[in-house]
Image: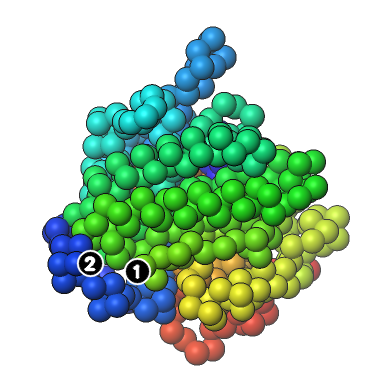
């Protein structure tokens, strides 16, 4: 997810080693090394987010400082280890997304030099995941400005061309450094430009609603700057898959997305799925979801038909046109096992969303912020230091793995629907 305490293949994996290859002019022709979107979907499969970890940060502004500073453990999680990712792999996940906040680790203009220790730690953690046999996605996460002076200020850039040019310059410098650090890593690594870029209104601010295309077009420019910066570093970065998010990473604004020009032709559209918010994230959460949920105990919208509608539209507008889409985050706050009916609906929601993602051909990555307990913003499934199951999550993860990987012809989205908790 996008702000504290928010957070938002099953085919056989090849164990690539990090080896340097030449650029496009040295035999590394994108046309010859391209991986088909369908193969990518199989490779990425069901994934897991290391949330509230490398994206966690201290907010020193309250103490009179203008800086925010990332810190791996400041939001309550222990340091991640190689054992964590071995457990993630053993649990049945194929990929891991590493949300990373850079903020106070970026030096002043014009170089915008990233702190070596921080960059090295991100590289090390990505290596842990790769060594465990996982695909890895690395991004910029809490750098977006929601009224808190962060550098990716889309509201300001939309009305100030000079500011937009400065931000594009910083995007170029930051992603040049990140990409250079990871240039020797194989296709197991995907770089994702941004997280949930928005002006703090999540699509409902006065400025955005007055003219949605204005900020969305700025994001299109930023996505292009990200792609250009990564490709320019050469090596494996000339051909690796890159993720470009929609505004607020919301499927609702996918129609405003213009995929960047890319000589490699290897771009993915990144979106998040937490519908309906009143069930998955909100403070006063409903205990039930779906067509068998009781009126008054579930949100007024967002049932199974909404899942099919949202993913179906993404499939029609992107996937079927050769542009892969992945759900970089999905999930739902933990329910208490002692409340059997609420737990049953919770498990059903996770199963239905994963099975729908599989049906529509979209890899999906579970949001896990490591929080122990039940209630709003509690998304802990695996201990971030050891990978051990927490919050009684093992049967939940097993269900999601089944929803993605099962080859049983009788196990369909319809059969999942038919097995919903009864009234």
Q: Residue furthest bottom?
A: 409
Residue 108 horizontal/vertical position (percent):
38, 24
Q: Is residue 191 above or below residue 413?
A: above
Residue identified by numbered label 2:
24
Query: Which sits in the foreground, 375 or 366?
Result: 366
Give residue 283's quadrant in the image: top right
Quadrant holding the C terminus = bottom right
Q: Dot 2 lies on which element? A: helix
Q: Earlier in the sequence, mark 1 or mark 2?
A: 2
Q: Is residue 368 above or below residue 326?
A: above
Q: Residue furthest top?
A: 64
Residue identified by numbered label 1:
264
Residue 221 visible (yes or no): yes
Checking the image for residue 199, the label placed there is: none
Query: Which sits in the foreground, 50 or 334?
Result: 50
Q: Residue at x 36, y 45 (%)?
A: 175
Residue 327 horizontal/vertical position (percent):
52, 61
Q: Residue furthest front?
A: 162
Q: Is residue 363 above or below residue 81?
A: below
Residue 87 horizontal/vertical position (percent):
31, 54
Residue 83 visible (yes or no): no
What colour scheme was applied to this rendering of the protein?
A: rainbow
Residue 23 horizontal/vertical position (percent):
20, 62
The 10 Å Cα crowd at callout 2, few under 14, some 14 to 19, many 20 or more, is: some
The answer to whether 154 appears left or right of 380 in the picture is right
Q: Are marks 1 and 2 in contact (CB under 8 Å)?
A: no
Q: Dot 1 lies on which element? A: loop
Q: Please give the count of numbered marks on the rendered protein.
A: 2
């Amino acid at each position: 997810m996008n702000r504290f305490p928010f957070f938002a293949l099953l085919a056989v994996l090849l164990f690539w080693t990090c080896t340097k290859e030449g650029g496009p002019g040295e035999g590394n022709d994108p046309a010859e090394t391209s991986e088909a979107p369908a193969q990518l979907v199989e490779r990425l499969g069901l994934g897991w987010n290391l949330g509230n970890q490398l994206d966690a940060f201290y907010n020193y502004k309250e103490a009179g400082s203008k800086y925010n500073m990332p810190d791996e453990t400041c939001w309550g999680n222990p340091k991640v280890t190689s054992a964590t990712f071995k457990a993630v792999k053993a649990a049945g996940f194929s990929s891991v997304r590493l949300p990373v906040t850079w903020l106070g680790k970026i030096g002043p203009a014009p170089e915008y030099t990233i702190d070596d220790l921080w960059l090295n730690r991100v590289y090390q953690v990505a290596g842990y995941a790769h060594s465990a046999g996982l695909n890895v996605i690395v991004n910029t996460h809490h750098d977006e400005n929601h009224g808190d002076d962060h550098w990716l200020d889309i509201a300001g850039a939309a009305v100030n061309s000079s500011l937009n040019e400065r931000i594009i310059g910083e995007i170029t410098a930051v992603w040049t450094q990140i990409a250079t650090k990871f240039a020797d890593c194989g296709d197991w690594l995907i770089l994702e430009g941004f997280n949930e870029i928005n002006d703090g209104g999540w699509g409902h601010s006065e400025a955005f609603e007055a003219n949605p295309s204005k900020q969305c077009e700025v994001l299109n420019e930023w996505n292009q700057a990200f792609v250009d910066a990564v490709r320019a570093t050469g090596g494996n970065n000339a051909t690796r898959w890159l993720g470009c998010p929609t505004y607020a990473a919301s499927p609702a604004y996918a129609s405003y997305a213009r995929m960047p020009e890319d000589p490699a032709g290897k771009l993915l559209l990144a979106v998040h799925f937490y519908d309906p918010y009143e069930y998955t994230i909100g403070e006063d959460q409903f205990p039930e979801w779906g067509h068998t949920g009781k009126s008054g105990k579930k949100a007024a919208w967002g049932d199974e038909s909404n899942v099919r509608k949202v993913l179906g539209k993404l499939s029609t507008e992107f996937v079927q046109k050769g542009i892969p889409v992945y759900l970089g985050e999905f999930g739902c706050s933990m329910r208490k096992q002692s409340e059997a009916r609420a737990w049953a609906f919770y498990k059903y929601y996770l199963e239905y969303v994963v099975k729908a993602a599989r049906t529509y051909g979209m890899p999906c990555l579970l949001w896990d912020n490591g929080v122990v307990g039940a209630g709003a913003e509690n998304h802990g499934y695996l201990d971030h230091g050891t990978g051990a199951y927490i919050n009684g999550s093992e049967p939940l993860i097993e269900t999601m793995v089944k929803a993605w990987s099962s080859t049983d012809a009788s196990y369909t989205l319809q059969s999942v629907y038919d097995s919903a908790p009864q009234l």
